[in-house]
Image (spheres, helix red, strand yellow):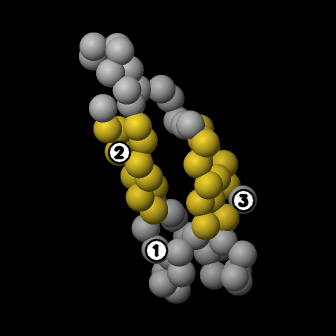
Amino acid sequence: MLSYTHSTVIADPVYCPVRYEYTIDSLANGGTPVTQTNDRQIDIYYDADLTPLDQTLTVTVTVIS
């Protein structure tokens, strides 16, 4: 499992709510990793087979305020 926590984004003005959306590319075999998010932390894992070894996985974080 890969776990990553990104830094906080501060909206201007600061009282505006901030929401994060995550987009994760498909793997080379077409599979989609399972993700769990909690605040600014995203956990990624893929347990179908060993295909993801030695692959780069791109995660895009979009901040919505």
Q: Is residue 54 visible?
A: no
* Numbered circles on residues, count: 3
Q: In the rendering, at what x and y percent does residue 12 appear?
A: 27, 16
Residue at label 3? 1
Q: What type is the residue that disc 3 sits on?
A: Met
Give the residue at x 69% y 82%: 48
* C-alpha span from label 2 to label 1: 17 Å
In depth, the one of 42 and 29 nearer the eye is 42
* C-alpha span from label 3 to label 1: 16 Å
Give the residue at x 51% y 64%: 56
Looking at marks 3 and 1 on the same chain, the residue that comes earlier in the sequence is marked by: 3
Give the residue at x 50% y 29%: 7
Please, is residue 1 above or below residue 39 in the view? Answer: below
Q: In the rendering, at what x and y percent does residue 32 appear?
A: 53, 75
Residue at label 1? 26
Give the residue at x 67% y 64%: 45
Q: Quadrant of the C terminus?
A: top left
* C-alpha span from label 3 to label 2: 22 Å
Q: Is residue 62 visible?
A: yes
Residue at label 2? 62
Q: In which quarter of the image is the N terminus?
A: bottom right
In depth, the one of 38 and 58 nearer the eye is 38
Q: What type is the residue that disc 1 sits on?
A: Ser
Quarter-of-image position of residue 55? bottom right
Looking at marks 2 and 1 on the same chain, the residue that comes earlier in the sequence is marked by: 1
Please, is residue 37 above or below residue 7 in the view? Answer: below
* Dot 1: element: loop
